[in-house]
Amino acid sequence: MTTDVTVTDEAVASLEGTADPRLRELLTGLIRHLHAFARETRLTQAEWERAIGFLTETGQTCTDTRQEFILLSDVLGLSMLVETINGDHAAGSTESTVLGPFHMTESPVRRLGENIDLVGGEPCVVSGRIVSDDGTPLPGAVLDVWQADGNGFYDVQQPDVQPTGNGRGLFTADAEGRFWFRTCVPSPYPIPTDGPVGELLKATARHPYRPAHIHFIATAEGHTPVTTHIFVAGSDYLDSDAVFAVKQSLVEDFTPTDDPSLAREFGIENPFRHARFDLVLDRA
Ligand code: BEZ
Ligand code: FE
């Protein structure tokens, strides 16, 4: 007969026939930790029902363009923990950070120098090189970029306001591993709060804001891809990111620039802001 003392061992033993050893290990850990949590907090039936209701609502909030489960993982710090556990990298290579829920659509292929801001925010140029961990440039490396507009919304959040692909671009580095593109200066924005994750933040008196940032995934042959952001130095919320994703090495100056030769080089009018940094990838 099952009792509150034996149920954990019985549930774990039920996994004996699992063919995949890693699956068995993960489920065993999950059962043991969930049971320990229920015992430690003396979880009530009503609280269990509330939690099931919350998770159900989280699933029902997901659509093709909204990922409430990733958001939940993000605000609980789980995404950043998993990211950090797996984020082994050589000293000096670019650190990774969370993917977030808005990389859910393919970025349009764009030419180097193109403007990904189709709406018109504060003009900005982002430039740098993609290099290997020994400093060798990586021609043909691919840079996937996505960001919110100057008002803090992604294109997928405002399909009736922003053109599809606004704030997104897929760029290929030139023969010297260089990349450059035009955009608008990103601003801090709140993560979506009109769903169950928003209720959770409200119930715990947490603000929903992320510091201003641009997302990147850099890939190059023979190298480990990196999923990362750059954060705007001086932005609000660098010290209290709602999803715990700030790393000091990823904070970059977006320098006010009024230099005619740079403006000519990037095909932009003065004044503009310029963020300049290299992405350093580990050899696979
Ligand atoms: C983002 O930066 O796009 C993001 C990351 C985590 C949660 C919500 C948004
Ligand atoms: Fe973002």
Image (cartoon, rainbow, N blue to C red):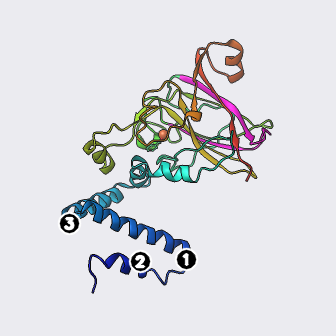
Secondary structure under tag 3 reads helix
- Identify the residue position indicated by label 1 in the image: 20
Magenta region, residue range: 123-147
Image coords of residue 246 (percent x, y): 50, 37
Res 272 quadrant in image: top right
Say if mark 2 contacts mark 1, CB within 8 Å: no
**Relative to 200, does residue 236 appear above or below in the rendering?**
above
Residue farthest left in this picture: 46
- Identify the residue position indicated by label 2 in the image: 12
| Earlier residue among tags 3 and 1 | 1
Secondary structure under tag 1 reads loop
Image coords of residue 213 (percent x, y): 51, 34
Graded by Cα atoms within 10 Å as few (under 14), some (14 to 19) or many (20 or more), the crowding at tag 1 reads few
* Amino acid tagged 3: Gln
Taking the spot 55% from the left edge, 77% from the top edge, the residue there is 20
Q: CA distance from mark 3 to mark 1?
A: 33 Å
Taking the spot 49% from the left edge, 48% from the top edge, the residue there is 80
Q: Is residue 261 visible to us here? A: yes
Graded by Cα atoms within 10 Å as few (under 14), some (14 to 19) or many (20 or more), the crowding at tag 3 reads few
Give the camera-side residue of 225 and 159: 225
Q: Which label was assigned to residue 45?
A: 3
Question: In the image, is residue 139 part of the stretch drawn in magenta?
Answer: yes
- Residue 241 left/right relative to 124: left
Asked if disc 3 is less than 8 Å from ligand 1, the answer is: no
| Earlier residue among tags 2 and 1 | 2
Q: CA distance from mark 2 to mark 1?
A: 15 Å
Res 249 quadrant in image: top right
Taking the spot 19% from the left edge, 63% from the top edge, the residue there is 46
Image coords of residue 117 (percent x, y): 54, 31
* Amino acid tagged 2: Val
Secondary structure under tag 2 reads helix
